[in-house]
Amino acid sequence: MHNILVLGGTIEATRLVAALAAAGLATTLSYAGRVERPKPQPVPVRVGGFGGATGLASYLRAHAITHLIDATHPFAAQISRNALHAAQATGTPLMALTRPPWTAQRGDRWHNVPDIAGAVAALTGPPQRILLALGRMHLAAFAQQPQHHYLLRLVDPPEARPPLPDHHIILDRGPFDAASDTALIREHRIELVVSKNAGGSGAQAKLVAARALGLPVLMIDRPALPARHETHDIRAAIDWLIA
Ligand code: 3Y8
Ligand code: NAP
């Protein structure tokens, strides 16, 4: 008897839970509660933190979870560490469903930096028009480089005015498409794109647009994650679950 918990927030998580629902396997999808209206799902959804690894372990026990899938975003490092610890503490089978990092293609002008702080440091210099497509959680870090014009793409309106003197906000949620991102970049006369190496298809449009327009990309590498049972293939995750 299955009782699966999927830690979500990515397209892969959405696709996985759709397949599990179709297969009639009891599944709950978990969101952190970062956005006002998380995408509706065909399985029960829980929203909010668990209270660290111990809270997640208690949840696994209390709900008799039989399998834990970590299908969170590669930059969601804390929840992934908690999932590994909670799975080990409770003896719950864990599989990470992730996507490979993007790699620079012919024609790409990438400058790789290790983290958000590295991206901020790399923006020292004369004013530029920058697409900052990193979401809302890291905007304050870029206040150290106030000289630029920032085009901010956010899912929800920010609670407070971002601490960036020269910015323009567009509210939109992915997955995005290359034609729209190319038009957006042209319309706002963007000169540089800043991106997390999210991988997958949902955030890739801005990279395709930058390549087409010959623009440089500041690419932020992923945080390191502990080794765990992992696949990039939804079919393999399903086979593991029903094995
Ligand atoms: C709450 C739940 C699905 C999932 C869709 C994917 C693709 C579209 C592209 C740009 C990049 C960014 C951001 C992004 C994308 C998918 C995926 C993805 C990037 C939703 C969602 C939740 C979030 C949280 C949100 C973060 C933010 C990051 C925006 C749902 C829509 C920038 C990551 O306002 C905030 O606080 C937003 C916070 C974490 C990163 C940040 O630091 O701000 N995602 N995004 C999840 C939760 O509560 O647990 O409603 O779908 C999901 C998706 N966003 O099922 O189709 O698979 O990655 N999400 C990045 O890649 O840099 C946008 O603008 O080009
Ligand atoms: P994070 O930094 O790894 O996690 C911070 C805390 O948020 C966790 O310790 C946990 O709180 C809670 N949390 C995170 N993901 C959760 C989930 N799926 N279900 C329940 N609680 C969760 O995570 P994050 O970077 O803020 O990402 C939050 C969510 O947005 C995740 O679902 C992620 O997949 C999605 N997302 C993030 C990004 C990104 O760029 N970071 C991009 C796209 C989607 P407790 O310790 O209290 O349990």
Image (spheres, helix red, strand yellow):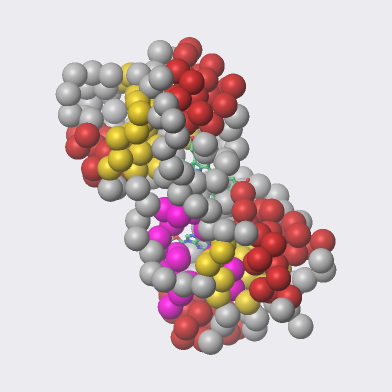
View extreme (front): residue: 106
Return the x and y of residue 147 as percentages of the image width and height: 22, 22
Residue 167 seen from this side: no
Return the x and y of residue 242 as percentages of the image width and height: 73, 75
* Magenta highlight range: 68-85
Question: Which residue is pictured at 38% across the width and 64% down the height?
Answer: 225
Question: Which residue is pictured at 66% across the width and 66% down the height?
Answer: 236
* Residue toward you, 20 or 107: 107
* Residue toward you, 113 or 87: 113
Return the x and y of residue 113 as percentages of the image width and height: 28, 42
Instruction: Pick the quarter of the image with the N terminus.
Output: bottom right
Instruction: Pick the quarter of the image with the C terminus.
Output: bottom right
* Res 219 → quadrant: top left
Residue 84, magenta (yes or no): yes
* Res 20 → quadrant: bottom right
Residue 202 seen from this side: yes
View extreme (left): residue: 125
* Residue toward you, 64 or 98: 98
Residue 118 versus residue 12 in the image, above or below: above
Question: Which residue is pictured at 62% across the width and 49% down the height?
Answer: 11
Count of residue discs: 0
Return the x and y of residue 132 as percentages of the image width and height: 38, 31
Residue 36 versus residue 49 in the image, above or below: above
Question: Which residue is pictured at 23% across the width and 30% down the height?
Answer: 123
Residue 131, magenta (yes or no): no
